[in-house]
Image: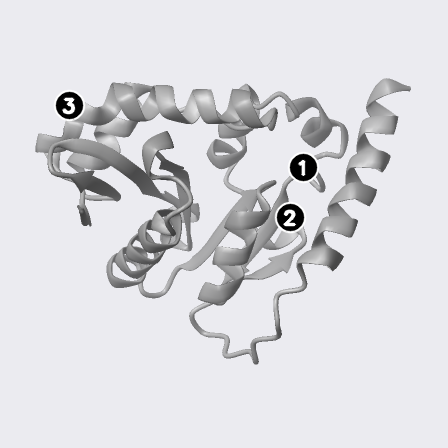
Amino acid sequence: MKIIRAKAEHIIYAKTISECIDESAKSRGTGIARRTPEYIMTKMQNGNAVIAIDQDKFAGFCYIEVWGHGKYVAHSGLIVAPDYRGQGLARKIKKEVFDLSLKKYPDAKVFGITTGMAVMKINYQLGYKPVHFSELTDDPEFWKGCQTCKNYDVLTRTEQKMCLCTGMLFDPNEKSKQKPFNERAIERLKQIKQALLLKKKKS
């Protein structure tokens, strides 16, 4: 198994990666922005992606997006192929893309939005902290990426202040003492948020 920076030679996996992301979102029943094969190809070609390869077989992927003229970066499209799930590969890929982003964009704040508890836990262990959406990039192009998510109407109704996703941020200039990850408390907050936002959606 190799976890490496993706290059132009890896564009042969772009369609598989795109389909894998879509299928994962459908099976989990969660909102997720679509990533076209063409978009994934551009990330590979400009050196802003990490791919996991088992011999010649695709195993996992994640890429970097740059926002606010380099003030922020985000890791998106984190996916592990079905045959490789449950082996800790997502954590290894996330660590690799995290290190890559710090190397390429050392002064940028690293952020993400997610509904997945596993991703939240990985982010937290890397030094991210949960934050209000107002602390994330205000770059309109980032939020346009949420348009293909099934929960996009929630985001627009709250004027980009809140959604079912949780915002998380890593500031390289901030040294904060890490607290234990409280999965039960975060899960409870997610349930409360879902109940409130989905109730407003139905009314």
Can you identify the residue that label 3 sits on? 12
Instruction: Count the numbered circles shown.
Output: 3
The answer, for residue 34, to whether it is visible in the render is no
Mark 1 or mark 2, which has the lower sequence index?
A: 2
Disc 2/disc 3 C-alpha distance (Å): 35 Å
Mark 2 or mark 3, which has the lower sequence index?
A: 3
Disc 1/disc 2 C-alpha distance (Å): 7 Å
- In which quarter of the view is residue 78 placed? top left
Can you identify the residue that label 1 sits on? 160
- In which quarter of the view is residue 199 placed? top right
Instruction: Look at the numbered discs 1 and 2 and tell me whether their residues touch, using CB distance below 8 Å.
Output: yes
For mark 2, give the secondary structure. Answer: helix
Q: Position of residue 60 (x, y in %)?
A: 30, 38
Identify which amino acid the numbered label 2 is placed on.
Phe
Can you identify the residue that label 2 sits on? 133
Q: Considering depth in this image, is 63 or 116 the residue closer to the camera?
A: 116
Q: Residue at x 64, y 48 (%)?
A: 133
Drawn side of residue 99 relative to residue 172, left or right: left
Q: Residue at x 71, y 54 (%)?
A: 186
Q: Position of residue 168 (x, y in %)?
A: 57, 54
Q: Residue at x 66, y 25 (%)?
A: 151
